[in-house]
Amino acid sequence: MGIDPKDESELFNKGLGIRRDVLGAAHVERSLSAADDFTAPVQRLVTEYCWGEIWGRSGLPRETRSIINLAMLSALNRPHEVRLHVRGALNNGVSRETIQEIILQVAIYCGVPAALDSMKVCTEVFREMDEEATASN
């Protein structure tokens, strides 16, 4: 089935642009093209309200939103989402050193096991991105 942006709302398309900027177009296209009758509603919800309505607000810069997301997702121990948002944070100008500090803060306030899981994910993403950069040179 997939989701065709031509058939969607203005808020969806605003969110789609932000989502692509932060998470990367390839990831977003895979998510939308894989949507079926069961998963399409949640893809619309996430794209319109998470990305269009909330990420589209001017009250916080994207870098700050990324920092908050990494802290919350790490605290909730959501490694799949941490993986996505590590890349997004780097795309939004958050340094690896700042990401390290975020995870250390999570360790103290939310627990070492959650921080260890997130640190492992961050390390994997950094390694993947370094390999991708080497391969493209």
Image (cartoon, rainbow, N blue to C red):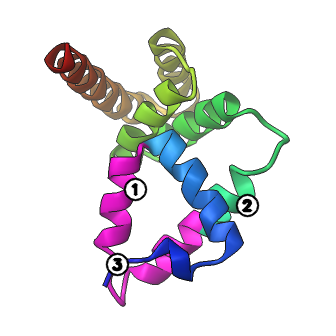
**Circle 3: element type:** loop
Distance (Cα) linking label 2 and label 1: 17 Å
Along the polypeptide, which appears first: circle 2 or circle 1? 1
| C-alpha separation, residue under disc 3 versus residue under disc 1 | 12 Å
Say above or below: 120 vs 97: below
Is residue 33 part of the magenta span, yes or no?
yes
Give me the residue at 64% from left, 28% from top: 63
Q: Which residue position is annotated with label 3? A: 2
Magenta segment includes 56:
no
Q: Is residue 103 left or right of residue 56?
A: left
Q: How many labels does the image show?
A: 3
Q: Residue 53 carries which label?
A: 2
The quadrant where residue 38 appears: bottom left
The label number, if any, that marks residue 28 in the structure image: 1
Range shown magenta: 24-47
Label 1 neighbourhood size at 10 Å, few (<14), some (14-19), many (20+)?
Answer: some
